[in-house]
Amino acid sequence: MNTLYRLSKYISAAALLSIFYSSASAQFNLQIPGLGNIGKLLDTTTKTFKEVDEPEEIRIGQEFASILLGAKPLEPDQRKQRYVNALGRWLALQTERPDLPWTFAVLDDPSFNAFATPGGYIFVTRGLLERMHNEAELAGVLSHEIGHVLRKHHLHAVQKNSAFSAAGDYFTSSTGGNAQVKSAVSGAIRNMLVKGLDKDDEYEADRIGVVIAARAGYDAYGLPSVLQTLQKQSSQDNNFTLLFKTHPLPADRLTQLDQLMGQQFDTLPGISGKTIEERLKEFGR
Ligand SMILES: [Zn+2]
């Protein structure tokens, strides 16, 4: 819990969030055409998993978050923490789960990666942030991660792990929280972080990500643009190894998105937004 406490200290920026919220509301009102239909894409999958209630989902997410924070420290530049958190929360407000304790943070790591955990904790690396060309690209990446949370992809991946199911209900059973159960849960999480999710979960998060970014007023092509950059990237570069290992090829993701996007997003007046560097200047010191 200590790590989470530290985390909340970094990113409780309600005042800044409200400034961002009010300036972004105008953008939201701009996007209308076709979104009603596109929005339906958010309500697709019905997979059957044992229901985990929301408090348990969040606590499993906290376990995830502490594992991630145990591996990489938080980026010390608090402007970046405030900025990513404000943008992420604005995006999360566009979804059917706006009330989760959405928490966004930047990890101090030069590699290019992003992680979502159950319950709404989302991390991007400093290396990813530095490689974004504009805010719409970052919005696309964060929305993809939000998509994983909405569809409970990581939660289900952990539930599928045999060690986890053998441990029973993590927090609700009488054994909840004991050392053995805890280690089964963290083992399942670590295993998942190395292996990544199913390809279909990644494709689904891409589709949802495009819709959320568009709903929030951003250019829907932000995420495809990031995938195009990744397509040119050598998988031999150490900063990209884990990402390539845990995700389908960028070209395959673009092909999948093409089928969704067709021309229906072309008419949306989404914005690309400023560069991240320009944006950070607005977030103080
Ligand atoms: Zn993903």
Image (cartoon, rainbow, N blue to C red):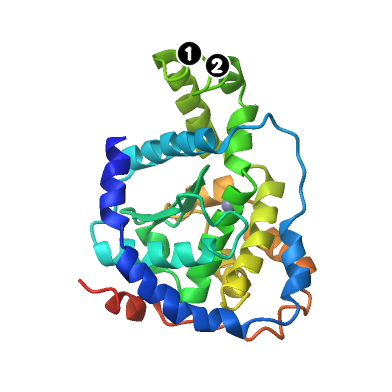
The picture quadrant where one finds residue 110 is bottom left
Secondary structure under tag 2 reads: helix
Mark 2–mark 1 Cα distance, whole angstroms, equals 8 Å
* Quadrant of the snapshot with the C terminus: bottom left
Query: x%, y% of residue 191?
Result: 52, 31
**Marker disc for residue 213:** none
Q: Mark 2 or 1 closer to N-term? A: 2
- What residue type is disc 2 on? Ala
Using the image as rendered, state which of residue 161 and residue 150 is in the foreground.
150
Q: Using the image, determine if residue 25 lies above or below residue 53.
A: below
- 24 or 273, which is in the foreground? 24
* Residue 136 drawn at (x, y percent): 52, 75
Mark in the foreground, 2 or 1: 1
Which residue is tagged 1? 175
Please name the residue shown 48% across and 32% down the image. 190
- Can I make out residue 258 in this image? no
Asked if residue 283 can be seen in this view, the reply is: yes
Q: In this view, does 126 lie to the left or right of 258?
A: left
Nearest the viewer among 114 and 176 is 176
Q: Specify the amino acid type for callout 1.
A: Thr
Disc 2 vs disc 1: Cβ atoms closer than 8 Å? yes
The image quadrant where one finds the N terminus is top left
Relative image position of residue 178 (x, y in whole percent): 41, 15
Q: Mark 2 points at which residue?
A: 167
Horizontal side of residue 199 vs 148, given as left or right: right
Task: Find out if the beta carbon at label 2 lies less than 8 Å from the nearest ligand 1 atom.
Answer: no
Q: Residue at x 35, y 60 (%)?
A: 126
Looking at the image, residue 172 lies above or below residue 257: above
Quadrant of residue 6 within the rendered picture: top left
